[in-house]
Amino acid sequence: MAFRFLSPRRAFLAALFVLCLAGRADALELKPFKDDLFAYPATLSTGDGGAYTVIDYREMRDINQRDEVPEKRVHPQYTDTGVRKAQQDLMLKTDAGDVRHIAVGKTQGAALIVLYLHGQGGSRKQGIDDFTFGGNFNRLKNLMAGNGGLYLSPDFPDFGDKGAAQVAALIDHYAEQSPGAKIFVACGSMGGALCWKLAARNDTGRRINGLLLLGSLWDESFLASPAFRRHVPVFFGQGSHDVVFPVANQEAFFRSIIARSKAYPYPTRFVRFETGTHGTPIRMVDWRGTLNWMLSKAP
């Protein structure tokens, strides 16, 4: 048998490849929490090599049957309010200003960190309400508390540079408390403006590990951001009947990300909720499935 010796450079690249595979194999995977109740309804179609999915959303089933009081209180089986024991309403003083926020889970030594940034007219309380949005925030809280993670829902003054600076300071603080944690930022509606600003910053753009845009907007500047260069995974959830941010615009932006990454496919997914409206993705996103996918792809 003939032996072929690799050059030092090829040997280094081969070793790096093996280490990357090993790292992905050891990636954290969130344990189930009420997966049967929160599973997506039927898939109507797929595209873009499986990255694009159309889901059969129906208001009568997914709101009226799921909620005890439609849009205000979900049926009890969708929630577990024992997680409130792990919930704290806190204030962090930073150079960018005081940041009031609610934390659920481990404020030190967390395995992962998830932030939710609300939209226009919201507050830190939206992201921790156990009963609205079909109990989906309660599920996220339980997933974080049950997997050694940390969930943060902050207030911020605006959707511009000041708001971004305060959220960045919040991320910086908790990243230092949990240096091994992957950090994922979910943005609802207008909160997406902050998602894109965080991706563009030199500090957070090099620190965050995933973005979730839920009924939100697009920003072409992302394609030149530090986060894009690092191939930070991006998830889009959009209702097909969203009149605030039209689905066609967000789909076009999603495909522009794919088009920019032919040599090394960009980790992005798009879930379209057919007949869904502006708030549908926040109600319907499968937090566990999406975060597990992001954990497997995170830089």
Image (tube, grey):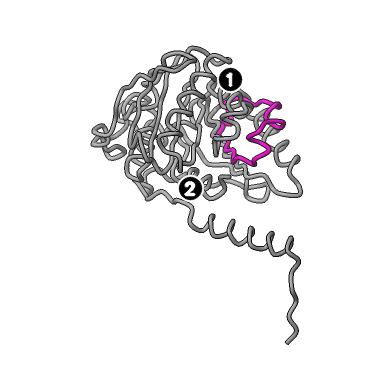
* Horizontal arrangement in the rendering, residue 101 relative to residue 85 (left or right): right
Of marks 1 and 2, which one's residue comes earlier in the chain? Answer: 1
Disc 1: CA contacts within 10 A as few (<14), some (14-19) or many (>=20) = few
Can residue 66 be spotted in the picture? no
Q: Residue at x 71, y 41 (%)?
A: 258
Q: Residue at x 60, y 40 (%)?
A: 232
Looking at the rendered image, the quarter that the C terminus falls into is top right
- Which percent across, then down, holds residue 54? 58, 42
- Asked whether 254 or 10 is in front, the reply is 10
Looking at the image, the residue that sits furthest to the bottom is 1
Task: Name the amino acid type tagged 1.
Answer: Val
* Horizontal arrangement in the rendering, residue 187 relative to residue 89 (left or right): right
Which residue is denoted by mark 2 in the rendering? Answer: 292
Q: Quadrant of residue 222?
A: top right
Task: Name the amino acid type tagged 2.
Answer: Asn
Could you say which disc has been placed on residue 84 in the image? Answer: none
Disc 2: CA contacts within 10 A as few (<14), some (14-19) or many (>=20) = some
Which residue is denoted by mark 1 in the rendering? Answer: 244
Q: Is residue 232 above or below residue 25?
A: above
Q: Are marks 1 and 2 in contact (CB under 8 Å)?
A: no
Q: Residue at x 32, y 31 (%)?
A: 74
- Which percent across, then down, holds residue 112? 43, 41
- Asked whether 39 or 169 is in front, the reply is 169
- Which percent across, then down, holds residue 126? 39, 22
Looking at the image, the residue that sits furthest to the front is 8
Region of the chain picked out in magenta, as a range:
216-241
Can residue 78 be spotted in the picture? yes
- Asked whether 212 or 98 is in front, the reply is 98
Secondary structure of the residue carrying numbered label 1 = loop
* Horizontal arrangement in the rendering, residue 101 relative to residue 20 (left or right): left
